Amino acid sequence: MAKKAPRRTAERILEVSLDLFNRFGEPNVSTTLISAELSISPGNLYYHYPAKEELINALFDRYERGLTELLNASDGVRDVEDAWFFMHSLFELIWEYRFLYRDLNDLLSNNRHLETHFQWVLKNKTRALRALLDSMAQAGALQIDARETEATATSMVVVLTYWLSFEYVRDPRHAMEPQSAQLAPLRGAHHVLNVLLPYLEMGQRMHLLKLVSAYSDGAANVAA
């Protein structure tokens, strides 16, 4: 049991750091605050993570692994319903690590690991959304000229990547709070998929509008 304690402490440090980063924004959370929240000494924190940057990198690496697993399922999306659940799953993961997106520009300018890896994240998102478009087109859910696929996938990636920044700017005091956990990802999924409306087969278009209405109403009732 004693041998497992250091791993458990390292795990708790990551869990608490993620919660604090999400609540207050990474630039506003010091290692002193993290150690105080955990009721451990700063030395104990430094033993596991000698610098705040290592904490951030460890959390990002977890996010990256989860994102890769999700994106690899993009070529299995056949219709609007598949796309809705796929996109909502992506936004749930982004919400779980929302501090990365809220403070993205600051993090990238100060952290070489994130700067290089986020380039890969963008490329992987674009690749996955191209695969999604191709798969939906093959299934007859949408019609899109091959020359438009790259630009459409890129537009979807822009919304996917910056949606939480938009939410934060629109309502900085509440957008990143737990009570927004239902509506923010739903709105994000809606607006990413809204890019597809001109290309969707009519039945698929109507189904998307019904999904948005049903899930938005349900989330609003839960929030109320």
Image (cartoon, rainbow, N blue to C red):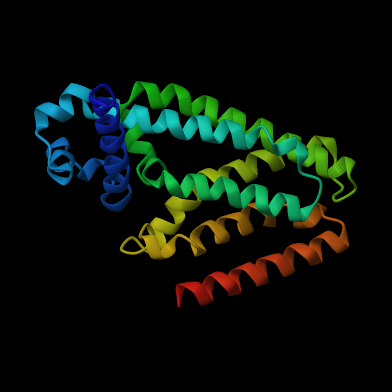
Please report the residue visible at 80 percent of the width from the left and 51 percent of the height from the top. Answer: 79
Image location of residue 188, percent across then percent down:
56, 56
Residue at the outermost front position: 1
Badge count: 0
Please report the residue visible at 29 percent of the width from the left and 32 percent of the height from the top. Answer: 8
Q: Is residue 2 above or below residue 164?
A: above
Q: Is residue 136 visible?
A: yes
Please report the residue visible at 17 percent of the width from the left and 46 percent of the height from the top. Answer: 37
Quarter holding the N terminus is top left
Quarter holding the C terminus is bottom left
Q: In which quarter of the image is residue 123?
A: top right
Q: Is residue 150 visible?
A: no
Image location of residue 143, percent across then percent down:
87, 47
Image location of residue 214, percent across then percent down:
66, 71
* Left or right relative to 207: residue 219: left
Please report the residue visible at 85 percent of the width from the left and 50 percent of the height from the top. Answer: 142
Near-viewer residue (39 or 34): 39
Q: In this view, does 81 lie above or below 19?
A: below
* Left or right relative to 117: residue 108: left
* Left or right relative to 62: residue 218: right
Image location of residue 219, percent across then percent down:
54, 69
Near-viewer residue (82 or 140): 82
